[in-house]
Amino acid sequence: MTMLTEKVDTEFLAAAPQCKVVDNMAVGYDNVDVPVLIEHNVLLTNTPDVLTETTADLVWALILATARRIVEGQKTIEADDWKTWSPMFMVGQDVFGATLGIVGAGRIGAAVAQRATGFNMSIIYYNRRPVPALEAQIGATYCQDLDTLLTEADIVVTLVPLTDSTRGMFGAREFALMKPTAPFINAARGPMVKEMELYDALQHGRPWVAGLNVFEQEPIRADHPLLSLPNVIAVPHIGSATVATRTRMATVAATNLVAALTRQAVPNAVNPEVL
Ligand code: DGY
């Protein structure tokens, strides 16, 4: 049973030659070299669905915290820098009625969009292909290309899985397309963002602020340049971190493993072809 902290590759399998199943306690499995597993006839399982709503809640926590400067507000009080109420003191950006741009309209993206309807938002999304259900049920509009989403969205959220084609997909060029008022939220995987280019972009105010749950190197260290910026909110990869959800993930992972080892139908097989 692995976590996203384990790199499962040729070297891993060489050290565990009898391994039959890699049971990843996460929905994402970019820590696993799937072609290598297939080559060695090793089954991979994951834990989808049970973390969808909890992760969508965390995305929303970051949307609201970034748009309304919640962490900066707390720090201001703690530093005794709140001198008086004044009209433009700590002003943020509206969320209600804004346009939410979701990059990656899988299960978590759809759950984030669902919540946005309560904020009366226009929802636009970019995905490998359109998701008709999202359009019919939530009124989301498909963007043919990422650039259109980035220029039109008031708030950008990325939720795509990390693959060779999404690695580094957000860099200086993409940030320059965003509105100077836009929060940028990454709750997927760190390597999708070129972090030093995000650092430069934030210093120039585009995006306006970043809410980051994931990082190129985890754990991110306290002396990382991004953390020196006032317009960054960072949390330590806690998308699915509630007691109930982590318990469900562990239970699903255990169920997958027992099913695989006792040759029953495996609920969440990523590479069922090896069966
Ligand atoms: C996942 O499951 O992929 C998350 O990143 C950890 O919950």
Image (cartoon, rainbow, N blue to C red):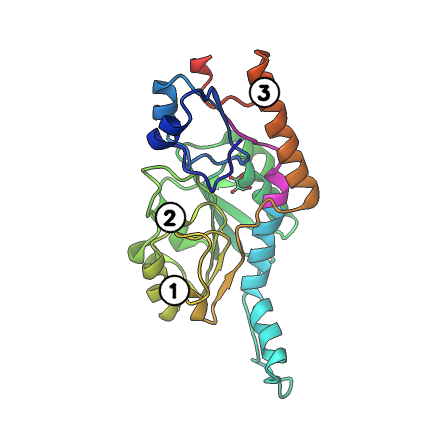
Q: Could you say whether the residue bearing mark 2 is in a helix, strand or loop?
A: helix
Answer with the quarter of the image where residue 145 lies.
Answer: top left
Residue 26 to residue 224: above or below? above
Relative to 251, does residue 74 appear above or below in the rendering? below
Amino acid type, residue under disc 3 in the picture: Pro
Circle nearer the viewer, 3 or 1:
3
Q: Are marks 3 and 2 in contact (CB under 8 Å)?
A: no
Q: Residue at x 44, y 46 (%)?
A: 189
Q: Residue at x 40, y 40 (%)?
A: 162
Query: Mark 1 — residue?
Result: 206
In the rendered image, residue 49 lying in the magenta stretch gets the answer: yes
Q: How many marks?
A: 3
- Secondary structure under badge 3? loop
Residue type, label 1: Arg
Residue 52 is situated, as x and y percent measured from the top left of the image, at 60, 38
Q: CA distance from mark 3 to mark 1?
A: 43 Å
Is 213 positioned to the left or the right of 31 in the image?
right
Residue 143 placement, left or right of 54: left
Q: Decide which of 86, 189 is in the foreground and name it.
A: 189
Q: Earlier in the sequence, mark 3 or mark 1?
A: 1
Disc 1, SS: loop
First-in-chain label (3 vs 2):
2
- The range drawn in magenta is 45-55
Note whether residue 180 is visible: no
Cβ–Cβ under 8 Å for marks 2 and 1: no
Residue receiving disc 2: 191
Q: Nearer the viewer, mark 2 or mark 1?
A: 2
State the image coordinates of residue 116 (x, y, percent, origin top left).
Answer: 60, 48
Q: CA distance from mark 3 to mark 2?
A: 29 Å
Q: Which x, y percent locates residue 61?
A: 60, 55
Residue 76, can we see it?
yes
Amino acid residing under circle 2:
Pro
